[in-house]
Image: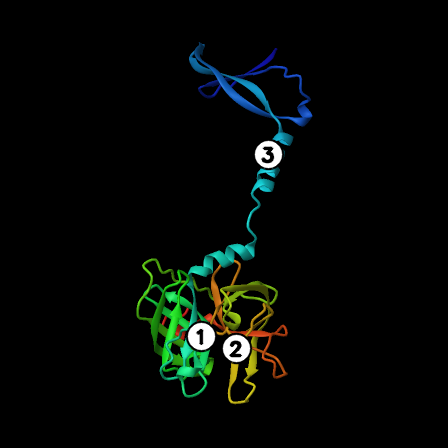
């Protein structure tokens, strides 16, 4: 047993620290002090407090091993998984019913005089009263609009506003789930090429589906295949998107919406993804909904 006594002559403390041999190499162990005694004493005109501390070892290798084992037993979710889980409650499927008498259920063309036309896309809830952003081309000309929420409930929806120059439509669902969550929107001011993003929606009506990628560029232009419309100030991304993703959110790894997926570039007639997608910045989309800019 060895000991050391230190006096704080100008104050009120006398510290005595005792070190007990543990049989372990001090180079491979940490030290944790344990309070084991307290006493008061007087030297001359000064009162002092004596604190006795015993040193006990902790073993860093053991702690490291325990942490590694905990991670192995329950791995942390990836950034993409966390982003998907955050945005998912706010994603909806949007169907524009273009044919009179179409109730949105399984198509039975024998009940109709001609083919049943539908616009199938995605949307994102931006206000928890059932306000939804989607693409105008998904619902343009629809006799009726149906939205399906993540809890499986369905509702008719009406168009509140449109922004044709950005291919945006603002919908309001007539009935909503009790626990409906609105997405968090984020300014694109600090968005840069190379940032990770996630597109969530219903490609070809399958979903909700998630695809991850990066921002490929900013302030891009896109001309529709028919040449009837040119969209500007777009976010270019390479996360897979296909028909049905239109109107869905493009989100950061924080699960925050920075854009509304609106188009894919494919010089052929296949209308499938070849690595170039475009989204309308959320600032434009928020303006369409009458929301203040960031």
The residue indicated by pointer 3 is 66
Residue 284 circle label:
1
Across and down, in percent, residue 37 comes to 47, 14
Q: Secondary structure at mark 2?
A: strand
Q: Above or below — where is 44 with respect to 232?
A: above
The residue indicated by pointer 2 is 233
Quadrant of image for the N terminus: top right
Label 3 Cα crowd, 10 Å radius (few <14 / some 14-19 / many 20+): few
Across and down, in percent, residue 219 comes to 55, 76
- Tell how many labels: 3
* Sequence-first tag of 1 and 3: 3
In this orientation, which residue lies closer to the viewer: 109 or 143?
Answer: 109
Q: Relative to residue 141, is residue 212 drawn left or right?
A: right
Quadrant of image for the C terminus: bottom left
Q: Relative to residue 152, is residue 56 drawn left or right?
A: right
Residue 93 seen in this snapshot = yes
Q: Above or below — where is 246 with respect to 87?
A: below
What is the distance, in whole Å, between disc 2 and disc 1 at their CAs? 9 Å
Q: Residue at x 45, y 16 (%)?
A: 49
Q: Residue at x 49, y 64 (%)?
A: 208
* Sequence-first tag of 2 and 1: 2
Q: Secondary structure at mark 3?
A: helix
């Amino acid at each position: 047993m060895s000991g050391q006594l230190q006096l704080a002559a100008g104050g009120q403390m006398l510290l005595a620290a005792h070190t007990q041999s543990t049989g372990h190499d001090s180079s491979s162990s940490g030290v944790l002090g344990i309070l084991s005694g307290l006493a008061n004493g007087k030297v001359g005109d000064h009162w002092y407090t004596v604190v006795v501390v015993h040193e006990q070892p902790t073993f860093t290798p053991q702690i490291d091993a325990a942490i590694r084992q905990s991670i192995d037993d329950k791995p942390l979710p990836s950034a993409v998984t966390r982003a998907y889980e955050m945005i998912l409650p706010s994603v909806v499927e949007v169907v524009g019913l273009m044919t009179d008498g179409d109730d949105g259920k399984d198509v039975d063309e024998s009940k109709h005089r001609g083919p049943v036309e539908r616009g199938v896309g995605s949307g994102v809830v931006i206000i928890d009263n059932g306000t939804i952003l989607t693409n105008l081309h998904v619902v343009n000309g629809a006799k009726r609009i149906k939205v399906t929420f993540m809890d499986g409930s369905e509702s008719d929806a009406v168009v509140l506003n449109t922004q044709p120059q950005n291919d945006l439509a603002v919908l309001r669902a007539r009935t909503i789930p009790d626990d409906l969550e609105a997405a968090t929107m984020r300014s694109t001011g600090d968005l840069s090429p190379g940032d990770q993003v996630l597109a969530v929606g219903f490609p070809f009506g399958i979903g909700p589906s998630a695809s991850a990628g990066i921002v490929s560029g900013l302030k891009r232009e896109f001309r529709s295949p028919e040449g009837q419309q040119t969209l500007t100030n777009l976010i270019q991304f390479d996360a897979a998107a296909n028909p049905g993703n239109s109107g869905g959110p493009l989100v950061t790894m924080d699960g925050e919406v920075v854009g509304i997926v609106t188009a894919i570039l494919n010089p052929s007639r296949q209308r499938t993804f070849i690595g170039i997608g475009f989204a309308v910045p959320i600032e434009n989309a928020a303006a369409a909904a009458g929301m203040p800019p960031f």
